Structure formats: structure tokens, C-alpha cells
Image (spheres, grey):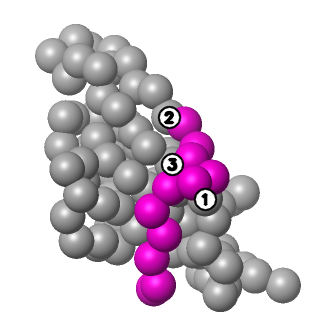
Amino acid sequence: MNTKEDVTWFYRSIPLSGIIKVEYNDHVLLSQDKALHMYDLKQENAGQYLCKSGHTVMAPYFLEVVNDNEPTVQASVYASFHGIYFNA
């Protein structure tokens, strides 16, 4: 069984660049259910997010930051089952 420590989130900016491991901080947290929670989003947070649990890489999620000038940022997140996959 996978534990919270087995879950790793990765990020790739759009346009596509290299894949980096998501670093957790005051604005980016991993919940008990292993979901990624992000607060105070900025335009640079937009991109592709991938979750690796054990040896399994889940379908990628894409985050689009609509307007980072407003106090409450609207973001749309959607999964792509035909997206770009990688080996991590």
C-alpha cells in the first residue's frame, strides 16, 4: 500500500519545459488524501501537474490561472487522459 511519502507531484510549465518536482511550502500543500492544494496562485503556477504514487504515474492535470491580479484567483483544472507522460 502506498503512503503519503510515496506520493510525488511534478510540474511542467506551458509552453512545455523540463519537469521539476513540486516543492511544498506555505502556498503548496499535500493533504491527508494526497491531493495537491495551492493557495495565492500566480501566473507562473499555470502548467501541467502530474502525480506519481509508488510506480504509477496518474493522468496529467492542467492548471490555467485566469487572472492573478484579483484577490481571489480563478483557476481551471482539467485532467487529460491523452496528455504527455514521462518517466520519473
* Mark pair 2, 3: CA separation: 6 Å
* Mark pair 1, 2: CA separation: 12 Å
**Which residue is tagged 3?**
61
Q: Earlier in the sequence, mark 2 or mark 3?
A: 3
Taking the image as shown, residue 57 lies to the left or right of residue 20, namely: right
Q: Determine contact: label 1, label 2, CB under 8 Å.
A: no
Which residue appears at 54% of the width and 36% of the height?
Answer: 78
Q: For residue 50, which numbered disc appears in the image?
A: none
Q: Determine contact: label 2, label 3, CB under 8 Å.
A: yes
Q: Position of residue 10 (x, y in %)?
A: 41, 67
Magenta-drawn segment = 78-88
* Mark pair 1, 3: CA separation: 7 Å
Instruction: Name the amino acid, label 2.
Output: Val
Which residue appears at 40% of the width and 25% of the height?
Answer: 75
Whether residue 60 is visible here, answered yes or no, is yes
Count up the numbered dots. Answer: 3
**Which residue is tagged 1?**
59
Instruction: Name the amino acid, label 1.
Output: Ala
Q: Is residue 82 above or below residue 7?
A: above
Taken as a whole, is the magenta stretch helix, strand or loop?
A: loop
Front of the two marks 1 and 2: 1
Instruction: Name the amino acid, label 3.
Output: Tyr
